[in-house]
C-alpha cells in the first residue's frame, strides 16, 4: 500500500498538463522570440499560459505575470529586483518564518549593508500587524511576508499587513507558493505588489514558476540577455513546461470551490484522530491554516531514537510519504528553525512532522496513516523506555 502525503513538497503532474506538454514538444517547439511561423506558434503557447496563470490570482493584465524557473527564482527576483533599484542600502522587513528562498536571500543583502528586520511570530506562527507597523522606517522599501507557511501551515493576515505597508508607501511581496491553487487569491483586492507562484505545487511540471508584478511597479532584472519576459527574465522560455503550468493553473482555479472544502474536511479529520495520540501536539494556527496542511510536534523527541526524521523513515517503510522540519547536517540533526522561531524548545523542534493532502487523498488514506503512526510511536517509545531503564541499571 502506497500513500503519498507530501503534497507541499511537490505534486504529481496531472494528465492534462502532461498532454499539453507532449503536444508542445512535438508540434509547437519553436523559439518564442523568432518571427517565423514556428516561433509564433510557440509564442502563442506562452501567452496562453500567461493568461491562464493570471486567471489563477485574478490578475487583469496577463503581462504582469513573469515566468521564472520556480518559486525560488520568483522570490529572488522580487527581493533582489527591488534591492538593485537602490544605489545605497535601505531597509527591508520579513518574518522569522519565511521560506529559505527569502531568508537566505536577505542575508546577502545584509552582507551588502542593508538593514533587515525579522518580525517575531507567536506560538501559532503568526505575525502581529502591530509589530509590522512599529518596524516600518522612513527607508523601508520592501516588506515580504509568506502567505501560507510551508512547514506549519499558518496563513498570515496578508490583507491587513498589505494595507499597513501600502499606507507607508513601501512595496509588499508575498510568497504564495503554498497558498495559490488552494486558497482564493485576488490581486485586484489584496494590497500586494509582488506575488510568487510555483507550478509543481498545483499539479503542474517542476522547473517553472512565476512572479506577479503589479502594473507600475519597477524591478531590476537579475539576468542579462535577450530581454525575454518583458525584459525582466532573459533566457529562452521553456515553452513545454510553461504550457503545462498554464493548464494546471487554469484547472486549479476551476476546482478551487470543490477541492478546498474537501481538503479541509480531510485535514480536520486527521487532526481529530492525531489529537488522541499521547505526546503529539498540533503546531501552527488551527483556524487560519492551509486547507491541505497537518503539522504536529513530538514533544518528547530526543534527536536520536525519537525525532521527526525517525517518523518519516518509519512511515516510509510502511509505504507512507510524509516530511519533517528538522534537518540533518554533517550527521547531526538540527532543530527546525521555524519551530524555534515560534517559541518551541530545541528538543520539541526536533520532532516536527508535516502531513500534506492532495487530489488523490481519501478518508481511508488518512485513517490508515494515523493508525500506522500510532503503532510506530508506541513501538518507538517502548524501545526508548527500555533503553532508559537499561542505562539506569548499568549505572
Image (cartoon, rainbow, N blue to C red):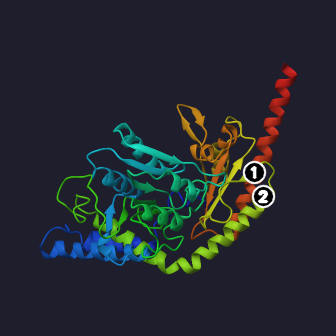
Q: Please determine whether, in this image, residue 309 is positioned above or below residue 265.
A: above
Quadrant (top left, top right, bottom left, bottom right) of the C terminus: top right
Total marks shown come to 2
Residue appearing at x 67%, y 53% in the figure: 318
* Residue 221 at x, y percent in the picture: 26, 55
Q: Which mark is residue 280?
A: 1
Residue bearing mark 2 = 275
In what element is the residue under mark 1? strand
Q: Which corner quadrant of the image does residue 343 belong to? A: top right
Give the residue furthest to the top. Answer: 395
Give the camera-side residue of 144 and 221: 144
In what element is the residue under mark 2? loop
Pointer 2 local density, CA inside 10 Å: few below 14, some 14–19, many at least 20: few
Q: Which corner quadrant of the image does residue 113 belong to? A: top left
* Residue 60 at x, y percent in the picture: 36, 78
Residue appearing at x 76%, y 64% in the figure: 272
Q: CA distance from mark 1 to mark 2?
A: 7 Å
Q: Are marks 1 and 2 in contact (CB under 8 Å)?
A: yes
Mark closer to the chain start, 1 or 2: 2
Q: Please determine whether, in this image, residue 394 is positioned above or below residue 5.
A: above
* Residue 291 at x, y percent in the picture: 61, 68
Q: Is residue 277 visible to us here?
A: yes
* Residue 70 at x, y percent in the picture: 38, 58
Q: Is residue 320 visible to us here?
A: no
Give the residue furthest to the front. Answer: 138
1 to the left or right of 204: right
Amino acid at each position: 500500500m502506497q500513500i503519498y502525503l507530501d503534497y507541499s513538497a511537490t505534486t504529481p503532474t496531472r494528465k492534462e498538463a502532461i498532454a499539453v506538454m507532449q503536444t508542445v514538444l512535438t508540434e509547437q517547439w519553436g523559439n518564442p522570440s523568432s518571427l517565423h511561423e514556428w516561433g509564433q506558434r510557440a509564442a502563442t503557447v506562452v501567452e496562453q499560459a500567461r493568461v491562464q496563470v493570471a486567471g489563477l490570482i485574478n490578475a487583469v493584465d496577463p503581462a504582469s505575470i513573469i515566468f521564472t524557473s520556480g518559486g525560488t527564482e520568483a522570490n529572488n527576483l522580487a527581493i533582489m529586483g527591488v534591492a538593485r533599484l537602490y544605489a545605497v542600502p535601505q531597509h527591508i522587513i520579513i518574518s522569522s518564518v519565511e521560506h529559505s528562498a527569502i531568508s537566505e536571500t536577505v542575508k546577502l543583502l545584509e552582507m551588502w549593508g542593508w538593514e533587515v528586520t525579522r518580525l517575531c511570530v507567536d506560538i501559532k506562527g503568526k505575525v502581529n500587524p502591530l509589530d509590522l507597523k512599529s518596524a516600518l522606517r522612513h527607508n523601508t522599501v520592501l516588506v515580504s511576508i509568506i502567505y501560507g507557511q510551508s512547514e506549519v501551515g499558518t496563513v498570515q493576515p496578508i490583507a491587513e499587513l498589505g494595507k499597513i505597508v501600502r499606507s507607508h508607501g513601501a512595496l509588499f511581496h508575498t510568497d504564495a507558493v503554498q497558498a495559490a491553487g488552494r486558497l482564493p487569491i485576488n490581486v485586484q483586492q489584496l494590497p500586494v505588489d509582488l506575488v510568487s507562484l510555483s507550478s509543481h505545487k498545483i499539479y503542474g511540471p517542476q522547473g517553472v514558476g512565476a512572479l506577479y508584478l503589479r502594473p507600475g511597479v519597477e524591478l531590476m532584472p537579475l539576468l542579462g540577455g535577450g530581454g525575454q519576459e518583458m525584459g525582466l527574465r532573459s533566457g529562452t522560455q521553456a515553452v513545454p513546461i510553461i504550457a503545462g503550468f498554464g493548464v494546471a493553473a487554469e484547472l486549479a482555479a476551476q476546482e478551487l470551490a470543490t477541492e478546498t472544502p474537501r481538503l479541509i474536511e480531510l485535514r480536520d479529520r486527521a487532526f481529530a484522530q492525531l489529537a488522541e495520540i499521547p505526546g503529539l501536539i498540533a503546531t501552527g494556527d488551527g483556524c487560519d491554516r492551509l486547507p491541505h496542511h497537518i503539522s504536529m510536534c513530538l514533544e518528547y523527541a530526543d534527536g536520536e531514537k525519537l525525532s521527526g526524521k525517525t517518523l518519516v523513515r518509519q512511515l516510509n517503510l510502511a509505504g507512507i510519504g510524509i516530511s519533517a522540519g528538522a534537518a540533518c547536517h554533517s550527521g547531526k540533526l538540527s532543530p527546525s528553525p521555524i519551530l524555534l522561531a515560534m517559541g518551541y524548545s530545541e528538543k520539541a523542534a526536533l520532532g516536527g512532522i508535516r502531513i500534506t493532502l492532495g487530489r488523490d487523498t481519501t478518508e481511508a488514506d488518512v485513517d490508515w496513516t494515523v493508525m500506522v503512526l500510532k503503532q510506530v510511536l508506541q513501538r518507538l517509545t517502548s524501545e526508548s523506555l527500555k533503553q532508559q531503564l537499561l542505562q539506569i541499571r548499568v549505572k
